[in-house]
Amino acid sequence: MAQVRFPQLLETDTADTRSALHDYARILGNYLKVCRPKRKHWWHASLRPSLSGLTTGVVHADIDFELELDLRQSNIHGRTSHGANLEAALHGQPAAEVARLAEDFLLANGLSKNLVPENAIGDDEVARVTYSAEHARSLHLTLNSVSAAMAEFRAGIPEETSPIQLWPHHFDLSMLWLPGEKIAGQDPRNEEYSDKQMNFGFTFGDEGIPEPYFYVTAYPFPDGFPSLRLPAGASWHTQGFNAAVLRYRLLIESSDPDAYLLDLWNSLLSAGREQMLANSDRGQRQ
């Protein structure tokens, strides 16, 4: 594969643009929760990176449709299998306005009213935010680069992995590694709590770490993880959640960001295989 090129994020504040896109992504996610059959780990309710931004992919309901946030052009697109199209500008308007555009489009083209999520419409009183189409494009380029790196990493994993997906509720891009073992004492029918797993992800920032960063965490979290030595720039985070964390700005300062990131992910995956599966073996022998 070609080497991934990670772009510089704009130095100016992208918080308002990111917040608006987060709200718009949740609108699409709400439709997925209602219109798609449930899949394990809520994979039915996540968005997928696209060439233009973020998409629901094809949704099969009363009609076959797709909704997409076009971050390159700052538009919302709607499409149906019989050729209907929606295109409207995103400019920082309240999520309620965007949700109403999607609802009107889908109802006019055959979607049943009972498949419109109850929480699809946000608060009309929420003020517009300062939205920048340039910032949206910058966020899109970064998501594309991280997605490409995840695809390269995922290709070398023989065990089950999740799709590379963006979670609307947290606005983070992630991929799960699932070695196929269950956690003792958990209901095996509830895979969210019974599947051993590692999560490799990226977010544009949150209350705990207000800047873009990569994270790698595991469930159950191995006792030996915090003692693992990480490469310069990465560190163990223990406040609010346990994870190996790498800030995006430190990644792109490295001489070979693509190799650095893949080495970090692969080393943590190897440690996860050793510690999570070895713990299971010890538990079975006791």
Image (cartoon, helix red, strand yellow):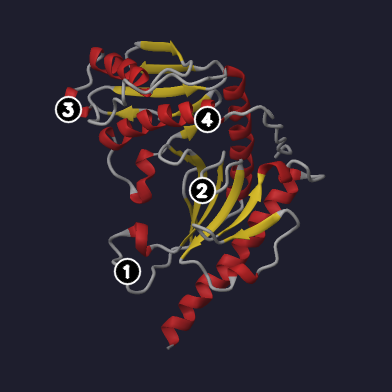
Q: Nearer the viewer, residue 119 or 4?
A: 119
Percent across and percent down for residue 198 are 51, 58
Tell me whether the residue at label 3 lies in contact with that at label 4, contact meaning CB atoms closer than 8 angstroms: no
Q: Earlier in the sequence, mark 3 or mark 4?
A: 4
What label sits on residue 186 in the rendered view? 1
Whole-angstrom CA distance, mark 3 to mark 4, is 30 Å
Three-letter code, disc 2: Met
Query: Splitting the image into 4 quarters, where does residue 80 fall?
Result: top left
Q: Residues within 10 Å of mark 2 (few under 14, many from 20)?
A: many
Q: How many angstroms separate mark 3 from mark 1 (CA)?
A: 35 Å
Which residue is depicted at the point 61% across and 41% down?
A: 211
Residue 18 is tagged as: 4
Reply above or below: 61 against 88.
below
The one of 241 and 81 positioned closer to us in this rendering: 241
Residue 254's spot in the image, x, y percent?
A: 79, 46
Splitting the image into 4 quarters, where does residue 144 fall? top right
Give the residue type that dot 3 points to. Asn
Instruction: Name which residue type carries label 4.
Output: Arg
Q: Which mark is residue 114?
A: 3
Which residue lies under the disc numbered 2? 175
80 relative to 272 in the view: left or right: left
Q: Earlier in the sequence, mark 1 or mark 2?
A: 2
Disc 1 marks which amino acid?
Answer: Gln
Secondary structure found at label 4: helix
CA distance for labels 4 and 2: 21 Å
Q: Earlier in the sequence, mark 2 or mark 3?
A: 3
Query: Circle 3: is it few (<14), some (14-19), or many (20+) Cα within 10 Å?
Result: few
Q: How many marks?
A: 4
Q: Is residue 66 above or below residue 187?
A: above
